[in-house]
Amino acid sequence: MPSKTEETFVNHLLAQMSLEEKLGQLNQVNPGSEFDPSVLREGKAGSLINASGALTGQGFSDSGSAELSNHFQKLALEARLKIPLLFGRDVIHGFRTVFPIPLAQAAAFDPDLAGQAASIAAREATASGIKWTFAPMLDIARDPRWGRVAEGNGEDPFLASQMARAVVKGFQGDDLSAPEKLIACAKHYVGYGAAEGGRDYENGEISEPTLRDVYLPPFHAAVKAGAGTLMSAFIDLNGIPATANRRLLTDVLRGEWGFDGFVVSDWESVKELIHHGVAEDEAHAACLALQAGLDMDMVSGVYLNTLGESLRQGKISMEEIDEAVRRILRIKHRAGLFDQPFTDPLRARRDLLTPEARNLARQFARQSMVLLKNDRDLLPLQGFRRILVAGPFVHARGELFGTWTPDGRTEDVTPLDEALRQTAPKDVELWFAEATDLALHLAHHADAVVLLLGEHPVRSGENCNVSDLGLPPGQAEFVQAMAALGKPLVLVVFAGRPLAITQQVSLADAVLYAWHPGIEGGAALGEILFGVEAPSGRLPITFPRATGQVPIYYNQKNSGRPVHPEGQFKTRYLDLPPSPLFPFGFGLTYTRFEYSNLRLSSDTLRGTLEISAEITNIGARPGAEVVQLYIRDLVGSLTRPIRELKGFQRVTLQPGESRCVSFTLREEDLAFTRADGTFGVEPGKFHVWVAPDSVSGLRGEFRL
Ligand code: NOJ
C-alpha cells in the first residue's frame, strides 16, 4: 500500500507535468551507440538501462559505475521538473562477486543464503550507480532444453516461492531508500518457461489451474514480499502476448494481489506486439500494452513516440497515462531517488568484492553442488597419490560464472587447476590435462581420474536452447575412452541445465553436479573433492534420462493409467524406463541418513497439523540433509499432482546423531484452484511424506 506522504508527493508532482514529461517517465532508454544525451535534459526518459553490450547476458560489457550514472543523472536533473532517472541493470546472480547461477542457488535449498547473496549483490550494484535490478527470474521451467532454465529456480512452485521471497527481501531490505538497497524486478510475468519445445521466445499454452497453481505462485510471493517492479514476458501465452495481457497485468496483479509498483516490458516487447499479430502498428501496440497495465516501455520508444497522438485521437485516456506515471514515480520516491539521486563514487572501493562476499560465494557454491553418484564411497578422494584432473574445464576461470555476469571479471577468479592445488592434501600429486589425448596418456599412470566436463556458459541462458540434452560434442566419447581404462573415475559436470548424462553416470564411479558455481567455484569444488566439506545440494529440477523424456517433472498428475514398468497399457516409453535419471529433491552426501518414527499430531487436519520424523546420521562423517515434506491430495474436483513439496529443512548431524524434524502443515497449504475456478481446499484424504527426495520417504495419512 502506498503511504499517504508518498501519494501526496506523487500526485503533486504529477499535477505539474506536461504530457511530454509524463511520456518521458514511461520511456526506458538504452545508452548504446546511437544514444543522444539530450533526451535526458528534455525529460524524455524515466529510466536508463545500463546494459549496453550485454543484450543476452553472454559475454561482458562495461561495468556500471557511479561516475557514469552520476553523469547521466546530472543531465536528467537539468530538465524542468528535475525528476531523477532510475538506473536498471541485469544483476542476476551477483554483481562483481559472482554467486552460483540461480538454478544452482535453488539446489542449495537454503533461501536465507540466497537472500544474503542478493543483499551483497545489492550493495555492490548500488555502489556502482545501479538502483534497479532485473531479477529475480521466477519462471517455472519443466523443459531443460530452454536455455533460461539456468536463470530460475527450477520446476517447483513452493521452492521458487521461498526463493522469491528471500531474494526480494535481500535486494530490497525493509527500506528501499537505504543507499545499499536495490529495487527488485520479478520476471518474466508470466509463463515464459512454458515456451514450446524449449525454444526461447516461442509461444506457450498453460491451462488456468496450472497457471494459477504452478506458474503464478512465485510471482505472488515476490509481490507479497514487496517487489517494487515486475517485467512482462516475451511469450504469447494462450494467444495473448504477456505484454498485452490485461487480465494478468491488471486484474490478477493489481486487482487480486494489490501490487502497487510498476511493470516494465521486456526488451522491445511492446513493439513486438506487431510481430505477434495483435497490433497493426506501433501506435496500436503501445495502446494495447498501456491499457493492459504495462507501465514502462523497455527501449522500443513506442510509448514516447505514439501515446501522445493516441491520446489526441481519444484512443487512450489521460487517466491511463497518469496511472502508469504515478506507479513509476511512486517507486522512484520509495527508492529515495528524489532525496539521493547520486551515488557516492567512494563506495565502490569499499563495497565491491569484500572478503565477506567471497566467503559467502564459496559457501553457496559448496552448498549448491549435488552429488549424484558415489559408488564405494570414492568421494571424498582419499588414499590416491597421483590424481589426473582432465577435461575442458581444467583451467576454467570466467567459465565458472555462468550466464548473465556482465560485471564479473575473469581476473577475480582463481583458475580451477590452481584452486584444486590449493585445496588438495600435501601428499597428493595433481596432474592436469585439458587435451583428450594427453589425458588418456597420463591416465595410465594415475591412481584416479577426475573429469571436468559440461557446458560452457555461452551454451546456457537467453536463447541458448538445445535440442539434445547430451554433453557437448566429443565429451561422451572422452568419458567412454577414459572409463575403458578402468581407473577410479569421478565426473564433475558444469552446466546451466540438467543434462541427460545417463551413459556417463553408468560409466563413472562418482558424479558431482557443479552447475556454474561462480567466482569461488574452484575452491568450493576442491574442498568437496578432498573432503574438507561435504556436498549437500539437492536437485531443484528433474533430470531426464534422455531428451525425449522431456517434459518430465515430479509433481505430475497420476493419469488413468499411471506409470508402470511392465504395464502394456500403462503410460510408458518402449525404449526407456518411465522414471527420470534423478528425481527432484535428490542428492547424496558423504554420510547416510535414516528416516524413522513418522508422527502426525492427529489423523485429521483442523487448522494445522504437526508432522515429524526422526533423522539419524548412520554414517561415519558429519553431514547435512535436506528433509522434505510432500503431500498428495488423493481425490479432488480437479486431478491433483502425485506429490507436492510443502516444506523443507536443512539439518546438519554428527555421526550417530538423531534429530526430530517437525513441520507444520496449515489448512491453506492444501488449497488449490478447484474445478469451479475458485481457490480453496477440499475435504478428503491426503498422503504426507517426510522424505529425502520426491520419490521416497516415510508416508502417513490424514484427512481434512
Ligand atoms: C531481455 C531479457 O529477457 C531480460 O531478462 C533482461 O532483463 C532484459 N533483456 C534486459 O537486459
Image (cartoon, rainbow, N blue to C red):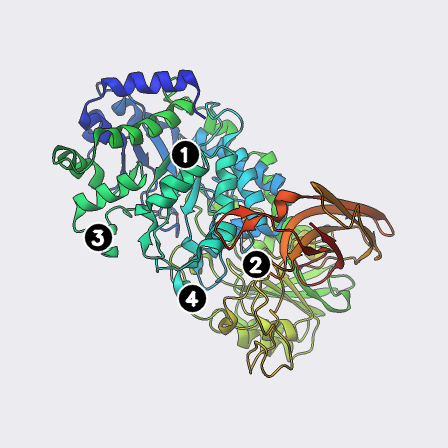
User: Where is residue 103 drawn, in percent x and y?
Assistant: 54, 52
User: Where is residue 95 drawn, in percent x and y?
Assistant: 47, 39
Amino acid type of disc 3?
Ile
> Badge 4 is on which residue?
466
Residue 254 in sight in this render? yes
Amino acid type of disc 4?
Val
How far apart in space, not on screen, are marks 3 and 1 (Cα)? Answer: 28 Å
Of the image marks 1 and 4, the number of the one nearer the N terminus = 1
How far apart in space, not on screen, are marks 3 and 2 (Cα)? Answer: 35 Å
Check if mark 1's residue and mark 4's residue have beta carbons within 8 Å: no
Amino acid type of disc 2?
Ile
Of badges 3 and 1, the one in the foreground is 3
How far apart in space, not on screen, are marks 4 and 3 (Cα)? Answer: 27 Å
Residue 541 is marked as: 2
Which residue is depicted at the point 35% across and 29% down?
A: 327
Residue 132 is marked as: 1
> Badge 3 is on which residue?
274
Q: Which of 603/62 is in front? A: 603
